[in-house]
Amino acid sequence: GEDVEQSLFLSVREGDSSVINCTYTDSSSTYLYWYKQEPGAGLQLLTYIFSNMDMKQDQRLTVLLNKKDKHLSLRIADTQTGDSAIYFCAESHEEGTYKYIFGTGTRLKVLA
Amino acid sequence: DTAVSQTPKYLVTQMGNDKSIKCEQNLGHDTMYWYKQDSKKFLKIMFSYNNKELIINETVPNRFSPKSPDKAHLNLHINSLELGDSAVYFCASSQAQANTIYFGEGSWLTVV
């Protein structure tokens, strides 16, 4: 079945880079997403990548996709305390019922 | 203007009660969803409607009944609330072609 996995916790120092990893099982995934959830708040779409891309950069965020290994990563450069949140990886298909499968979320803690 | 709005944001109610959570989106999307986020932050899809038609119905107790009066609204009604229903419920929407999902702020339901 479809599954998306992430490590549960990551702790980094302010100013360092953070790398949050995600693996998925469904090879027919078309879009892969990163969402951010701040404490007590909803889910904010950070970025997404189409499955035929290897990399996407958006300011401090870099998304890398290794389709062969079904591995997705989110790199946050110059991590700030405001980046502390839970980061969810998600995947979806172009066809079918548009069911989005979310990972378990990675709780990023940024230390001052 | 809020793109996906849901009400109420917080709801505390007693076991056995019936309650509804309302959701509206002003993005002109044709697909709407309900997700449940449990205490461990796992996000699971419950329902999805496309053009007012139910297209995803995961294994959810039939005490949960979604209602979509039009494309812009998807309400969630829960009968005979149980302690295990305590969670954050997220409404979301997407336009099928764009395939990017936008979430509401979440509704925190506590059953006591």
Image (cartoon, coloured by chain):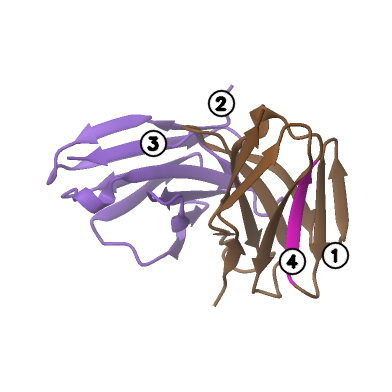
Chain colours: A brown, B purple
Above or below, B5 against B47 in this view is above
Q: Which residue is mark 4?
A: A71
Q: Which residue is mark 1?
A: A52
How far separated are the C-alphas under marks 4 and 2?
33 Å
How far separated are the C-alphas under marks 1 and 4?
13 Å
Q: Residues within 10 Å of mark 4 (few under 14, many from 20)?
A: some
Tags 3 and 2 touching, CB below 8 Å: no
Frontmost of labels 3 and 2 is 3
| Amino acid at the residue labelled 4 | His
> Where is residue A51 drawn, in percent x and y?
79, 64
> Where is residue B67 drawn, in percent x and y?
36, 48
User: Which chain does the numbered disc 3 sit on?
Assistant: B
Frontmost of labels 4 and 3 is 4
- The mark nearer the N terminus, 1 or 4, is 1
Say which residue appears at 81% left-offset and 61% top-offset.
A65
How far separated are the C-alphas under marks 3 and 1?
35 Å
Q: Which residue is mark 3?
A: B107
User: Which chain does the numbered disc 1 sit on?
Assistant: A
User: Which chain does the numbered disc 4 sit on?
Assistant: A
**Is most of the magenta stretch helix, strand or loop?**
strand
Tell me the quadrant of the picture where the N terminus of chain B can be found: top right
The stretch of residues the image draws in magenta is A70-76
Could you tell me if residue B106 is visible in this image? yes
Q: Residues within 10 Å of mark 1 (few under 14, many from 20)?
A: few
